[in-house]
Amino acid sequence: MSNKKKQLTVMGTVWDFWSVLKMFDKLYESKYISFYEPWLKGEIDKEKIILFNEKSKNPLLWPFKILKRTYKILKIIREFKPDLVITHHDDANVSIIPVILLNKIFKISNNTKFILWVRNNPIESYKEGLYSKIIILAYKYFYKYADIIIVQTQENKKIIESHFKSLKNKTKIVPNVYEIDKLQQLSHEPLEKQYLNIFKDSFVF
């Protein structure tokens, strides 16, 4: 029997989150929820992926989609009993709010901590439309019920804390992460001519 702690990752997207997922998979006994399609690469065991397989993108059905997600996620939490539930990004973050509130009321999993991973500056990203209004309302009134809010830059931390006072003591910074193999590949690619002038007076040690 594994002595590792458990984590459940709930994903709205994965492209800029892959290195973090690989780290989680090594550190924790893990399960992953993907709403639309399993964007996970081969290194993650497919048996760990729970695919909701949602098809409709109709905004009128969004409230029903959230209710359905809430029921499914609560059921998984009750059975898996994760130490951490990590969501990424706002599509997943908003979906987890009812789960957090119901978990606080009904004590479904007392020891579970909820971490919301925020990718963008919400003030710039969510200016128009019903979906944007819902996201901003979630920041203003409901994100405070999470245990930690993760942002990727100091600037985003300042913006979020200045607009949403209830998040001031909850916001932490985890910088953008990159895969080492991608950096190694880039290091062997030649620089474009327009950038070479930057280094014309430079020395390499």
Image (cartoon, rainbow, N blue to C red):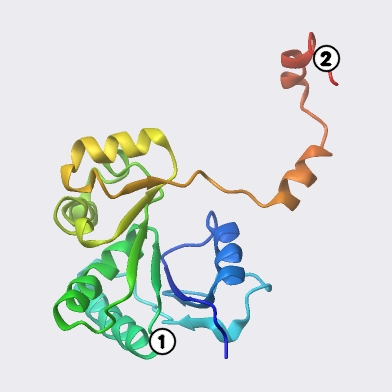
Q: Quadrant of residue 202?
A: top right
Which is nearer the eye, 9 or 114? 114
User: The C terminus appears in which quarter of the rendering?
Assistant: top right
Q: Around disc 1, counting alpha carbons within 10 Å, would you say few (fewer than 14), some (14 to 19), or many (20 or more)?
A: some
In the displayed structure, would residue 200 be above or below residue 27?
A: above
**Residue type highlighted by circle 1:** Phe
Residue on which the image places disc 1: 80
Residue on which the image places disc 2: 203
In the displayed structure, would residue 146 be above or below residue 149?
A: below
In the rendered structure, the answer to whether residue 193 lies left or right of residue 173 reads right
Helix, strand or loop at label 2? It is loop
- Residue at image position (20%, 56%) is 144
Task: Work out whether mark 1 precedes mark 2 in sequence or the reverse, and give the earlier one.
Answer: 1
Residue 191, numbered circle: none
Q: Quadrant of residue 76?
A: bottom left
Could you give the CA–CA distance between mark 1 and mark 2, rounded to whole angstroms? 55 Å
In the displayed structure, would residue 161 be above or below residue 69?
A: above
Q: Around disc 2, counting alpha carbons within 10 Å, would you say few (fewer than 14), some (14 to 19), or many (20 or more)?
A: few
- Residue at image position (79%, 46%) is 185
Q: Quadrant of residue 18?
A: bottom right
- Measured as percent of width and height from the top left, residue 49 is found at 52, 81
- Measured as percent of width and height from the top left, residue 26 is found at 62, 70
**Residue type highlighted by circle 2:** Phe
Q: Is residue 157 visible?
A: yes
Helix, strand or loop at label 1? It is helix
- Measured as percent of width and height from the top left, residue 119 is found at 41, 49
